[in-house]
Amino acid sequence: MDRSVPRIGAWAGFIAVIGIMGYHIVLMLIAGPRVSGSTDAAAIAAYYSNESIAILGVGAILVLVPFTVFLVALREVTGQTSTSRFPFGDHLAHTSAARLGASVFRPDPSVLATST
């Protein structure tokens, strides 16, 4: 496998983590501390009436792009063979059965007969 796939995945994961952390830190700096668990209606209204929450929310959605790249690269790197990468549909069941062994899906009758 080319070394660029793990490298791209690592950088994408790093960018996604920085984006998530940055979103929460910037939101706390601009809108103040979170009001989760608070019963003060004025504090809740003041927090959620801040216009920066909507703009930062769009930025948080953009973090999905590098996170998706990270997940695809992780799947590509951890796939053991070319047939185990991105299996879809019925192929998934056959690949899993072949990899795990048929005994996982169909127990041996002799083992069942001897157990009490």
Image (cartoon, rainbow, N blue to C red):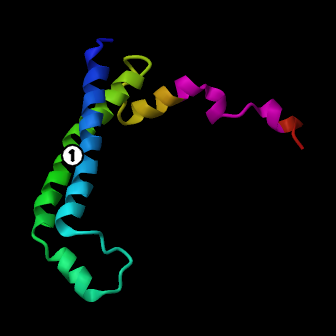
Magenta stretch, residue numbers: 97-112
Q: Main secondary structure of the magenta part?
A: helix
Q: Quadrant of residue 100?
A: top right
Position of 76 with respect to 94 (left or right) is left
- Specify the amino acid type for callout 1: Val
**Above/below status of 11 relative to 43:** above
**As rendered, which of 98 and 61 lies closer to the eye?**
61
- The quadrant in which the N terminus is found is top left
Q: Is residue 5 left or right of residue 62?
A: right
Would you say residue 84 is visible in this rendering? Answer: no
Residue 26 higher or lower than 88, as above or below: below
User: In the image, is residue 102 part of the stretch drawn in magenta?
Assistant: yes
Is residue 112 among the parts visible in the rendering?
A: yes
Residue 66 on image: x %, y %: 22, 38
Q: Residues within 10 Å of mark 1 (few under 14, many from 20)?
A: some
Asked which quadrant contains residue 109, the reply is: top right
Q: Residue 13: x, y in percent?
A: 29, 35
Q: Residue at x 54, y 24 (%)?
A: 99
The picture quadrant where one finds residue 113 is top right
Identify whether 106 is placed above or below 33. Answer: above
Residue farthest to the top?
2
Decide which of 76, 101 is in the foreground and name it. Answer: 76
Residue at 30%, 13% (x, y): give it: 3
Image point (16%, 64%), residue name: 30
Residue occupied by mark 1: 63
- Pick the quarter of the image with the C terminus: top right
